[in-house]
Amino acid sequence: MKKHEHALLLALSESEKTTSDAIRAQSQRLKRTALSSWMAVAIPVIVTLALSAGAIWAMSWYMNSQVEQILNHRATLERLAEEGAEIQLTYCGDNRRLCAKIDESAQTYQGGYRILEGY
């Protein structure tokens, strides 16, 4: 009976070791799966946030340059208005060519140039 008991204990011990090894291996596989699942979510989120931050920075840079350009144009228009340049341009004829009124009382300059009305 002792021999049988000893053989049974050996079989149980070996079975316990095999089960324990299987559990440990499964635990390692689950850890790898959990890590890869976490990375599959985290990486796209991080990339999306980085791209969004880059887009926001680029748009703010672009808008600042546009605001600066608008301010420069306003300053130029104010300076021209102070100098008397209130020229009104329109489109003339069937071809819609750009035209302006000419001050016909002003003298003619070399090459046929004349002063525009309002300047």
Image (cartoon, grey):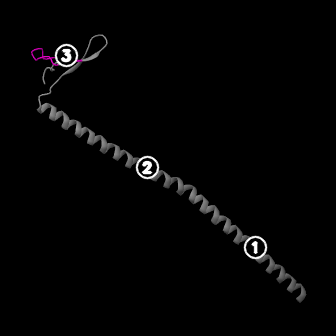
Q: Dot 1: few (<14), some (14–19), or many (≥20) neighbours within 10 Å?
A: few
x%, y% of residue 110? 18, 19
Please state which of residues 89 and 111 is positioned toward the viewer in this rendering: 111
Q: Earlier in the sequence, mark 1 or mark 3?
A: 1
Q: Magenta span has 1? A: no
Residue farthest along the front direction in this orientation? 110
Q: Nearer the viewer, mark 1 or mark 3?
A: 3
Residue farthest along the top direction in this orientation? 94
What amino acid is found at the position of numbered circle 2 in the picture? Ser
Q: Label 1, secondary structure: give it.
A: helix
What amino acid is found at the position of numbered circle 1 in the picture? Thr
What amino acid is found at the position of numbered circle 3 in the picture? Gly
Please state which of residues 43 and 100 is positioned toward the viewer in this rendering: 100
Residue underneath mark 2? 52
Q: Which mark is residue 19?
A: 1
Q: Magenta span has 100? A: yes
Quadrant containing the N terminus in the rendered view = bottom right
x%, y% of residue 6? 86, 86
Q: Label 2, secondary structure: give it.
A: helix
x%, y% of residue 92? 25, 13
Q: Dot 2: few (<14), some (14–19), or many (≥20) neighbours within 10 Å?
A: few
What secondary structure characterizes most of the magenta part? Answer: loop
User: What is the distance, in whole Å, between disc 2 and disc 1 at their CAs?
Assistant: 49 Å
Q: Determine the residue positioned at 11% across, 28% down.
A: 84
Q: Which residues are magenta?
A: 99-109
User: What is the distance, in whole Å, between disc 1 and disc 3 at their CAs?
Assistant: 104 Å
Q: Are marks 1 and 3 in contact (CB under 8 Å)?
A: no
Q: Nearer the viewer, mark 2 or mark 1?
A: 2
Q: Determine the residue positioned at 87% across, 83% down.
A: 7
The answer to whether residue 79 is seen in the rendering is: yes
Residue underneath mark 3? 112
Q: Label 3, secondary structure: give it.
A: loop
